[in-house]
Image (cartoon, helix red, strand yellow):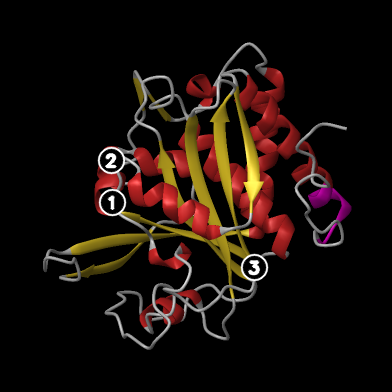
Amino acid sequence: MPAHTLEALRLDQSVPRTSYARAIVQEYVDAAQELFARDHLAFNMEFDLADWCRIISHAPRTDGRNPAFVPGETPPPDDSYWLRVTHRDGRLAAIMAARYIETDLGFYDHVRDGRLWWPELRPLPVIPTRSGPSGSMAHTGGLWVSPDPDFAGIGISWMLTRLNHMIALARWNLDWAIGVVFQKLVDKGVAANYGAEMRELMLDAPLGPDGSRLVMYALPNSRDFLIERTRTDLVNIRNKEDQKMRDLAPFAKGKYQSTKGR
């Protein structure tokens, strides 16, 4: 059995709603490991967010810690995990996290109440007026890729984000996996690597620690979209065994496909 099958990742085999979805997730986890291996990388799934927090707190070139994944700064999650990508020589290449959202609210109402980032009610001027996606949801984020030239710009953010979505979908039987990104990532085209089903302006207000404007977009992904995107990715990965992440990702070093205006 491959080292990173769903069983090894301790995912609940009864979670996906159809045998087709289960097969897609299972195969994708294995394909992702094979694709990482083409760059001498491997991933592990871990469950102590304090370790993710220690890494992100001292990592170079970050925008700080996303409080949604910091133990003690948000209500204790019903469940959470993070992914660690390492080189075969032991160097850390990337990390990313996910947490289940326990709420009776739609996503935008959840953020509007401040519940995504703080334990207490802290109203925010969320731009969409509707409640937003609802049902079983996960917040995915906390992505950091090492600036080491061996890892930066080789497509890790593309692969790790998509892998994280599918692990979250299988683990929690999700209706939605939702991330948020800053304006600068949208402007640079990096958000294209995340392959979101939708992109919607969510916040534009002077909420930065120094009073600066905080502009953030929500990236909602429905279950059906994630499964179909994963099926398409699997075809590309399996049919292009001579290619690496940098060849398959929309945004990688030396390659840029703008998504502005989409």
The amino acid type of the residue labelled 2 equals Arg
Label annotation for residue 61 = 2
The residue tagged 3 is 79
Is residue 232 left or right of 92 when viewed as pictured?
A: right
- Image location of residue 95, percent across then percent down: 49, 43
The residue tagged 1 is 63
Q: Quadrant of residue 101?
A: bottom right
The amino acid type of the residue labelled 1 equals Asp
Q: Evaluate whether residue 118 shows in this view.
A: yes
Q: Helix, strand, or loop for circle 3?
A: loop
- Image location of residue 61, percent across then percent down: 28, 40
Magenta stretch contains residue 4: no
Q: Evaluate whether residue 220 shows in this view.
A: no
Mark 3 → mark 1, Cα distance in angstroms: 24 Å
Classed neighbour count for the residue bearing mark 1: other residues with Cα under 10 Å, few (<14), some (14–19), many (≥20): few
Q: Earlier in the sequence, mark 3 or mark 1?
A: 1
- Image location of residue 98, percent across then percent down: 56, 58
- Image location of residue 234, percent across then percent down: 69, 32
Residue 92 vs 78, above or below: the answer is above
Residue in front for this viewpoint, 137 or 3: 3
Q: Quadrant of residue 209?
A: bottom left
- Residue positioned 44% across, 67% down in the render: 68
Q: Earlier in the sequence, mark 3 or mark 2?
A: 2
Classed neighbour count for the residue bearing mark 2: other residues with Cα under 10 Å, few (<14), some (14–19), many (≥20): few
The amino acid type of the residue labelled 3 equals Asp
- Whether residues under marks 2 and 1 lie with C-beta atoms below 8 angstroms apart, the answer is no
Q: Helix, strand, or loop for circle 2?
A: loop
Residue in front for this viewpoint, 198 or 189: 189
Magenta residues (range): 17-22
Mark 3 → mark 2, Cα distance in angstroms: 28 Å
Q: Helix, strand, or loop for circle 1?
A: loop
